[in-house]
Image: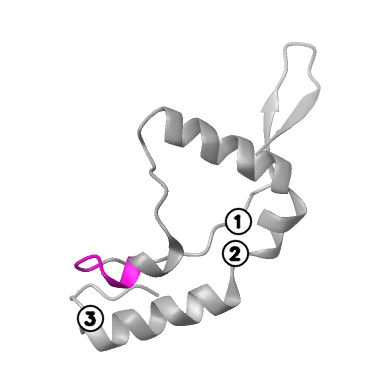
Amino acid sequence: MWPLEPISDQDRIAKNIEFIARGNHKSAIKYEDKYVKIVKTEIRQGWMFPIPLHYINVLKQGELAPVGIDDKVWTDLPDGSRKTKF
């Protein structure tokens, strides 16, 4: 749960370190090819930019959130079939 009020730098950095140690959700590893494709697209579009992982603690109010890939979403095709949307 994310607090509605700012957290202390000490708590923020501790949480970032915890997330760095834990890594992303298992689904990001399971669907690594899809994950890499999505991230590259978002970088190209300017919605995301890569930085060294431990640099997050240098950024003012920088916070990490582990990522995952949702494979429970689908797109309905014209023929009535469904295609998994990641």
- Between the C-alphas of marks 3 and 2, the distance is 22 Å
Q: Residue at x 59, y 70 (%)?
A: 23
Task: Name the kind of residue labelled 3 in the image.
Answer: Ile
Give the camera-side residue of 10 and 78: 10
* Pair 1/2: label in front: 2
Disc 1, disc 2: CB below 8 Å?
Answer: yes
For mark 3, what is the residue?
A: 7
- The residue under the point 66% across, 55% down is 28
User: Which residue lies at the image location 22% right of the left edge and 81% below the top edge?
Assistant: 7
How far apart are the two marked residues, 3 and 1, measured between alpha carbons? Answer: 24 Å
Apparent side of residue 33 relative to residue 51 in the rendered image (left or right): right
- Upstream in sequence: badge 3 or badge 2: 3
Q: Count neighbours of disc 3 (C-alpha within 10 A) and say few if under 14, some if 14 to 19, many if 20 or more.
A: few
Find the magenta span and give its range. 56-61
Q: CA distance from mark 1 to mark 2?
A: 6 Å
> Which amino acid, by three-letter code, is at mark 2?
Asn
Quarter of the view holding residue 86:
top right
Relative to 18, is 81 on the left or the right? right
What's the residue type where badge 1 is placed?
Answer: Gly
Query: Where is residue 70 shown, x and y percent of the image?
Result: 64, 49
Question: Where 75 sits versus 65, above or below?
Answer: above
Q: Which residue is mark 1?
A: 68
Q: Earlier in the sequence, mark 3 or mark 1?
A: 3
- In reply to whether residue 57 is colored magenta, the answer given is yes
Magenta span has 13? Answer: no
All told, the count of numbered labels is 3
